[in-house]
Image (spheres, grey):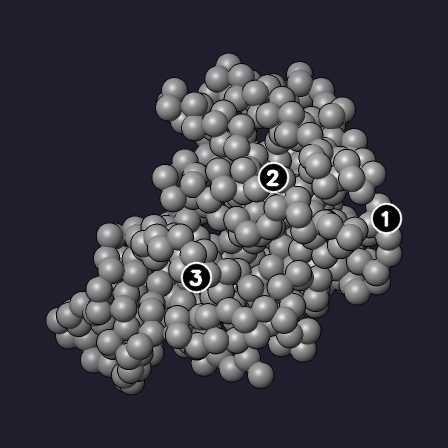
């Protein structure tokens, strides 16, 4: 069994409240101690991490890996590598693949492909309804027994509220977390744009904030009725944040996240019909963006996700109404997080909680911590290294990011995945 120690890193572990220079000691796949080495521990090697920050491996609550079925956009191997090299050790992937993740065989396929790739851990979400059709309840208990961590209907709204109630009652029985992207299908008839001044000027059919808040209100009421544990995925609006904050204050078992992109971009991005900013969850007003930023810092939100959505180049090289929605974000996730910290002058430990122990706690995952006994998933990065985002430098197959040409500070230099130490060399 391999044993080694990492010395002189600034260790930030929100789960245990640690933020100081200390050592980490790894034996096999586990962390055996932080600080002083345990009695009888003999390191086979020593790693000097002076100048680096060591955090738990990042946990991404929502990403589309495309495989199976859409390998022209991305594969599990390419995206798991992009995730790991970007500091993410656990990726929770959406079920909107082909076939949909509504059978055990598909869950097993995803696990097998991820294991063969050997990069970030991949944990699928189960389809809430068969074929994501919003009508027939999926076998979510069976799928979770097979390795799914929760269940969602992805970006497909369920219009029938009785179906939603039955799903919540079913999930409550088996203690399964349900993930909802709160969108009212009847109000969300637009096409990747916020119903505001920019969309009005461009003449683009758009999605009002009410599409989110009406759905949120309904879901919160049903959660109150059923007692189900609900996670609201990729919130976009100030009013949506208010509704979630109120639900939490009333003691409901609800959690919520927003995407890293929604902390930076607003409706102004789609000026000149720029499809790089076309997102399934639209970028809203500047006031909404600021409210999301505030909710990250005040503890209302439990996590920040990537909302990774890789596309082939041609999918964006068409007029805005027909362009594919979504941004590729795995490669820039950590650098954007560090930029957010710099812009807000916030505590780095506060933000690291939202991408480590926070998301892990949503699904009760055994990761996102550096405490003794935990699996050794560790991210080591140098916050001083600058890197310009280039097409060639992106490891994801999806190059559809509006961050091309932008310079970020922060570079992952080493990763530990289940005790395996990897030197990161990004071209």
What number is the disc on residue 285?
2
For mark 2, give the secondary structure.
Answer: loop
Q: Nearer the viewer, residue 321 or 183?
A: 321
Earlier along the polypeptide chain: callout 1 or callout 2? 2
- The reply, left or right, for residue 271 in relation to residue 178 is right
Regarding residue 198, the answer to whether it shows in the image is yes
Q: Which residue is found at the position 75% from the left and 59% from the top?
A: 311
Real-space CA distance between mark 3 and mark 1, rounded to the nearest whole angstrom: 33 Å
Q: Which residue is found at the position 41% from the left and 49% from the top?
A: 354
What number is the disc on residue 338?
3
Q: Nearer the viewer, residue 375 or 105?
A: 375
Real-space CA distance between mark 2 and mark 3, rounded to the nearest whole angstrom: 23 Å
Question: Which quarter shows the N terminus?
Answer: bottom left
Q: Nearer the viewer, residue 396 or 361?
A: 396
Give x and y (percent) for residue 293: 46, 44
What number is the disc on residue 322?
1
For mark 1, give the secondary structure.
Answer: helix
Q: Is residue 162 above or below residue 188?
A: above
């Amino acid at each position: 069994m391999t044993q080694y120690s990492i010395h002189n890193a600034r260790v930030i572990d929100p789960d245990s409240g640690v933020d100081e220079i200390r050592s980490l000691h790894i034996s096999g796949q586990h962390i055996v101690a932080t600080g002083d080495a345990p009695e009888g521990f003999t390191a086979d090697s020593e790693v000097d991490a002076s100048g680096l920050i060591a955090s738990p491996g990042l946990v991404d609550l929502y990403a589309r890996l495309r495989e199976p079925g859409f390998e022209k956009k991305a594969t599990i191997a390419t995206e798991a590598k992009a995730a790991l090299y970007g500091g993410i050790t656990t990726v929770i992937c959406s079920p909107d693949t082909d076939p949909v993740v509504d059978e055990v065989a598909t869950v097993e396929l995803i696990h097998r492909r991820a294991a063969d790739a050997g990069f970030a851990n991949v944990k699928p979400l189960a389809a809430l309804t068969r074929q994501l059709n919003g009508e027939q309840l999926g076998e979510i208990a069976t799928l979770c027994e097979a390795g799914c961590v929760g269940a969602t209907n992805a970006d497909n709204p369920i219009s029938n509220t009785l179906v939603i109630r039955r799903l919540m009652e079913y999930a409550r029985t088996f203690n399964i977390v349900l993930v909802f992207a709160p969108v009212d299908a009847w109000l969300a008839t637009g096409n990747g744009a916020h119903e505001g001044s920019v969309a009005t000027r461009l003449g683009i059919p758009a999605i009002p904030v009410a599409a989110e808040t009406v759905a949120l209100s309904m879901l919160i009421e049903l959660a109150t009725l059923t007692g189900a544990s609900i996670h609201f995925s990729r919130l976009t609006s100030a009013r949506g944040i208010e509704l979630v904050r109120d639900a939490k204050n009333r003691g409901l078992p609800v959690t919520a996240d927003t995407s890293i992109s929604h902390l930076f971009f607003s409706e102004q991005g789609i000026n000149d019909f720029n499809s790089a900013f076309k997102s399934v969850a639209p970028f809203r007003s500047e006031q909404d963006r600021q409210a999301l930023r505030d909710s990250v810092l005040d503890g209302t939100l439990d996590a920040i996700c990537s909302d990774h959505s890789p596309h082939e180049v041609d999918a964006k090289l068409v007029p805005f109404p027909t362009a594919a929605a979504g941004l590729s974000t795995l490669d820039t996730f950590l650098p954007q997080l560090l930029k957010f910290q710099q812009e807000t002058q916030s505590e780095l430990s506060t933000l690291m909680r939202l991408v480590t122990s926070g998301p892990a706690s949503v699904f009760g995952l055994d990761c996102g911590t550096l405490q003794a006994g935990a699996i050794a998933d560790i991210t080591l990065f140098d916050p001083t290294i600058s890197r310009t985002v280039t097409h060639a430098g992106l490891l994801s197959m999806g190059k559809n990011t509006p961050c091309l040409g932008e310079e970020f500070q922060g570079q992952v230099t080493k990763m530990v995945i289940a005790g395996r130490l990897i030197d990161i060399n990004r071209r």
